[in-house]
């Protein structure tokens, strides 16, 4: 058997071994399915980018609004404080923002919160429910995972002057508005934008608590989380169901296989799981058939070993008796008789060993053999010619109705099939009377090739037709010297025929003729 290359094993199965070293199959099924849900959870991080885009849009919007407000204020006289206050109050109400107008020296002139009710109020996190704290914790967690740019906390300056606001300092005397974002105490965005008035009559500052951004993002995040949780629950349930339908039967098969390995009783068997039509069911039935075949092979091996021991003991006992007799006998005639007995026993033992060796190799050799098309007619013709040359027929006539070429073709091992017919012919010749006739016929029958070998001997009683194929069974014709046959010939023939998916049996000859008829049926070779 070829040994796999270590490098190949390491390359192909290294990852698999590391993956399965500590994880059960159930755990791996759960991990794989939950991993897909984890990829779906990446949508939570996308929502953080979505919040950043909303914030950028709101900052641009605040700069545009502030530019419009600044132009409207510049259209009025700098000393018309009442008109400017009315404008600021209206803009503040429409924009839900706080507007502050500062004089050129930086002092605050107008504050919308002083003109009307505040358009927003910062919420103290302490007063909010626990779910809000959880939402803020999730915000911080996602921001830290995606490495979001840190945002500072919003704080009103101790003295409300233009110089205290970074946005107004950055705007300077330019025409563009400057905006920034910071966090309120409850981690909602605070939009701050500042701009110098076009007529240099002061500067305007806008602040707004954009709580809607946080509300939109958290609502979307809650929807995604709900989908993820539902998908995770369904995935886990399906994973457990899949593990139940796969892992439990495999564990059951493994436990049964362990019991078969450790047990000594024939009643221990692998469950066949007839209700399953999937690969697990196929595996269970394959293991069941394999264990049954293995048990049958083990039982056959044990029985064969017992039979071999019994059969060898007889000639060994006879040989030992003859050798012991030689020590006590002085008569040359008796010594020669004892030596002849000893030589016969040695030859008998040698024949037994050869036949036993051949019988023990048949199954293994058939399992490794590569079958090829065999013309049974041609094989029998060549076998009969060889027997004629060796004078193996002992005066018995053999009649063979040779079929046409390639009519009786089977798939098989030519050498082993020839051994079958040789054993059957030896058996037929040994039981035939002097000058008797052995008839051989090979004909196709549907998908099979049927071979009949019939002799004119005493025949085989119906109750013994199965026993004659057992190992070491020997029922020889009268007058034949004892020990000339091992009793394995027909057993070997049956093993070879069955190894070719065929069948051998003994039939009565037609029309009440005397003798036995051996019928061999072999599958026909494909055309």
Image: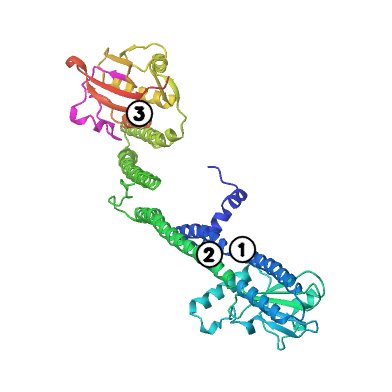
Q: Quadrant of residue 476?
A: top left
Q: Nearer the viewer, mark 3 or mark 1?
A: 1
Pick the front one: 247 or 404: 247
* Image position of 26 (left or right of 510): right
Q: CA distance from mark 2 to mark 3?
A: 75 Å
Q: Which residue is mark 3?
A: 497
Image location (x, y in percent) of residue 274:
31, 45
Q: Would residue 314 be seen by someone viewing this image from the given angle?
A: yes
Look at the numbered disc 2 and give the secondary structure of its residue. Answer: helix
Look at the numbered disc 3 and give the secondary structure of its residue. Answer: helix
457 magenta-colored: yes
Look at the numbered disc 1 and give the secondary structure of its residue. Answer: helix
User: Height in image: 18 above or below 501?
Assistant: below
Image location (x, y in percent) of residue 18:
56, 59
Residue extent of the magenta highlight: 451-479
User: Height in image: 140 above or below 484?
Assistant: below
Q: Residue furthest bottom?
A: 158
Image location (x, y in percent) of residue 168:
76, 77
Whether the residues at callouts 2 and 1 have beta carbons within 8 Å, the answer is yes
């Amino acid at each position: 058997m070829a040994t796999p290359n270590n490098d190949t094993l390491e390359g192909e199965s290294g990852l698999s071994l590391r993956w399965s070293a500590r994880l059960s199959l159930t755990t791996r099924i759960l991990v794989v399915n939950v991993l897909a849900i984890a990829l779906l959870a990446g949508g939570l991080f996308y929502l953080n980018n979505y919040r950043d885009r909303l914030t950028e849009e709101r900052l641009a919007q605040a700069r545009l609004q502030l530019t419009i407000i600044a132009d409207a204020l510049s259209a009025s006289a700098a000393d018309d404080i009442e008109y400017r206050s009315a404008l600021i109050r209206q803009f503040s109400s429409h924009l839900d923002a706080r507007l502050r107008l500062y004089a050129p020296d930086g002092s605050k002139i107008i504050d919308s919160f002083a003109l009307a009710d505040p358009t927003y109020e910062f919420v103290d996190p302490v007063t909010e429910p626990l779910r809000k704290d959880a939402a803020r914790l999730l915000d911080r967690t996602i921001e830290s995972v995606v490495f979001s740019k840190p945002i500072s906390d919003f704080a009103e300056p101790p003295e409300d002057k233009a110089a205290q606001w970074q946005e107004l300092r950055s705007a300077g005397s330019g025409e563009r508005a400057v905006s920034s974002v910071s966090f309120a105490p409850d981690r909602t965005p605070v939009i701050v934008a500042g701009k110098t008035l076009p007529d240099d009559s002061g500067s305007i500052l806008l602040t707004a608590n954009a709580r809607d951004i946080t509300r939109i993002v958290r609502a979307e995040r809650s929807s995604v989380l709900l989908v993820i949780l539902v998908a995770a629950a369904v995935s886990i349930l399906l994973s457990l169901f899949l593990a139940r339908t796969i892992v439990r039967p495999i564990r059951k098969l493994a436990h049964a296989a362990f019991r078969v390995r450790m047990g000594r009783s024939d009643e221990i068997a692998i469950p066949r799981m007839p209700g399953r039509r999937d690969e697990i069911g196929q595996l269970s039935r394959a293991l069941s058939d394999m264990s049954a075949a293995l048990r049958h092979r083990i039982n056959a091996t044990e029985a064969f070993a017992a039979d071999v021991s019994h059969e060898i003991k007889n000639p060994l006992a006879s040989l030992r008796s003859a050798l012991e007799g030689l020590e006590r006998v002085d008569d040359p005639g008796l010594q020669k008789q004892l030596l002849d007995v000893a030589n016969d026993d040695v030859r008998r033992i040698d024949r037994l060993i050869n036949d036993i060796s051949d019988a023990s190799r048949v199954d293994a050799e058939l399992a490794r053999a590569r079958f090829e098309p065999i013309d049974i007619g041609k094989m029998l013709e060549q076998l009969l010619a060889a027997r004629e040359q060796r004078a193996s027929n002992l005066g018995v006539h053999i009649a063979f109705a040779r079929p046409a070429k390639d009519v009786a073709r089977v798939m098989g091992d030519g050498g082993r099939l020839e051994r079958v017919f040789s054993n059957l012919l030896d058996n037929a010749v040994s039981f035939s009377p002097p000058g008797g006739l052995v008839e051989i016929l090979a004909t196709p029958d549907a998908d099979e090739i049927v071979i009949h070998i019939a002799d004119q001997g005493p025949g085989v009683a119906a109750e013994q037709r199965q026993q004659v194929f057992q190992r070491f069974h020997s029922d020889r014709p009268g007058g034949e010297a004892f020990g000339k046959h091992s009793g394995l010939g027909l057993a070997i023939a049956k093993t070879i025929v069955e190894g070719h998916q065929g069948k051998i049996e003994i039939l009565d000859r037609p029309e009440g003729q005397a003798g036995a008829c051996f019928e061999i049926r072999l599958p026909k070779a494909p055309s």
